[in-house]
Amino acid sequence: MQLTGADIVIECLKEQGVDTVFGYPGGAILNVYDALYQHSDEIKHILTSHEQGAAHAADGYARATGKVGVCFATSGPGATNLVTGIATAYMDSIPVVAITCNVGVALLGKDSFQEIDITGITMPITKHNYIVKDVNKLADTVRDAFRIAKSGRPGPVLIDIPKDVTANKAEYTKVAIEPYFPDPSEILEEEIETAVSMIEKSERPYIFVGGGAVLSGASEELMEFVNKVDAPVTDSLMGKGAFPGTDKRYTGMLGMHGTKTSNFGVSECDLLIVIGARFSDRVTGNTQSFAKNAKILQFDVDPAEMNKNVIITAGVTGDIKEVLKKVNKKLSQHSHTEWTEKIQEYQVKYPMKYHPEGLTGPFVIEEIYRQTKGDALIVTEVGQHQMWAAQYYRYSKPRTLLTSGGLGTMGYGLGASLGAKTGCPEKTVVNIAGDGCFRMNMNEIATAVRHQIPVIEVVINNHVLGMVRQWQNLFYGQRYSATVLADGVDFAKLAEAMGAVGICVTTREEFQEAFAKALEMNQPVLIDCQINSDDKVWPMVAPGASISDAFDEEDLNKKQ
């Protein structure tokens, strides 16, 4: 069957089971949008307010559903506006396929109108990318892109297609796409044996869970593993929900804003078992003193992560789900009562706490948890609110916290929440934002209204760039350079101007009432929560310090 390149793109998306595309049209990609119009009953298109919003929406869709997210953009600035979203997905290993179109083949390299070398630009931030100059290669390229995006360590792939290629014709034959499953035979038995031996000999094991456990769908195997090892569990920001935050063995997040229990426990354990985590600097603090009393055993799908940031004792390379299956079969039942009781004593001694009066970020997060019964999809921007969302909402299932962990992208959350709600329409989706972040992507409120996507936007508004101000307060002599957002913007009225419901709250009671109302309304709602400019995220580890040096407000007051 002879089809145009544009029709081939759409048919290949249908092969892959794509039901939603996020994007923004333009001249170079016009043929693809014309082909999409003919299939609007099969593939929904969400027109975002900005291409960056489309990239973040595709990312949020992928994180929430486990499927590959897809976004479209035209040439030049359309394509470059995807870059931050692609980089966000790359840093967090999220499977996204970005399809851009370019000027015609004969015009490439001639500084033509809206021409840009988007494959050159995105080479460092994609698993792979393509420019397809021959329509006969287009179908196989699209299929390869999806396979690469979701296999092994997932990540984004970009396909750039010159406009004349989308108009040219080629023979198309439909291909049945086989589901991807990792190959357990690639896991080395000797690595499994070494891992089991290390666990058997340990007296004070600690389990550290990262985003790889979420991406591989390993929650069931992880629970069996934790039961067998009988060890306390901590996680990274990206690992939340892989192991239930409601379990008694869970001790909270690790690292710069992790709990004292987790930071002290990891510093005292004799074996740290790292499951799908990459030893981010925000987790390790000073790498020279990180887990200094422990042997380190790492499970990861990507061999490049072994010994990259922290020198490990041993590792097992492979898909986390498959690795845990193999380890669980060989592992005997253990009991570490004395060690686990010591960690539980730390939990009693060092509880998470915040000011008991007034409207605060932690109170807002706990109230959202209470009213949603822990069953919402929580999306965040980046900053203090992100840390509070990690600390005070208890994630009991994977793919329920969607946040930019690696790149730390302000402006990520609202677009991502639209993607998450589109992919999981039955779930309550709440985006937690700061006022600084909201300013970067507020235009996507219009997208939510246009497409009737009922997300709840909660802006924790302290009228400053909160996390940067916290550092300025603690480490820069309270010199608040360019972090005060003292202007007259009324976020609630802004939301109303775009067609959403806007509510401003200043007390705990007002927030409780507003959020309950938002849950009932089934339409886009923004709640502007006015909090104190100097509220801080506690505990904290100073940059360059050891995680065992975590301190909170009481420690700071005593020191002063």
Image (cartoon, rainbow, N blue to C red):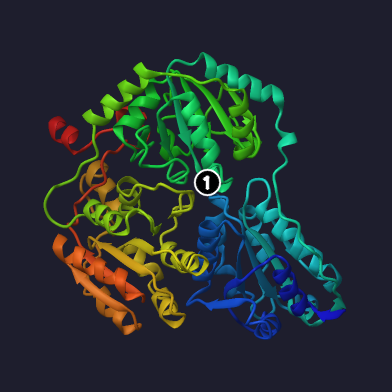
Q: Which image quadrant is residue 343 in?
A: top left
**112 is higher (above) or lower (below) than 192:** below
User: What amino acid type is highlighted by mark number 1?
Assistant: Val
Q: How many marks?
A: 1
Q: Is residue 28 left or right of residue 66?
A: right
How crowded pointer 1 is (Cα within 10 Å; few <14, some 14-19, many 20+) is rated as many
**204 is higher (above) or lower (below) than 227:** above
- Asked whether 346 or 334 is in front, the reply is 334
Residue 186 appears at what percent x and percent y?
A: 74, 35
Task: Give the residue at mark 1.
Answer: 214
Q: Residue furthest left?
A: 357
Residue 274 appears at what percent x and percent y?
A: 51, 31
Residue 118 appears at what percent x and percent y?
A: 66, 66
Residue at position x 20%, y 41% from top?
353
**500 is higher (above) or lower (below) than 205:** below
- Asked whether 486 or 225 is in front, the reply is 225
Residue at position x 81%, y 65% from top?
175
Could you tell me if residue 148 is visible in this image? Answer: yes
Q: Is residue 43 left or right of residue 248?
A: right
Residue at position x 25%, y 67% from top?
516
Q: Which image quadrant is residue 80 in?
A: bottom right
Q: Quadrant of the C terminus?
A: top left
Q: Is residue 169 left or right of residue 96?
A: right
SS label for mark 1: helix
Residue 380 appears at what percent x and percent y?
A: 39, 58
- Asked whether 103 or 454 is in front, the reply is 454
- Asked whether 375 or 215 is in front, the reply is 375
**258 is higher (above) or lower (below) than 175:** above
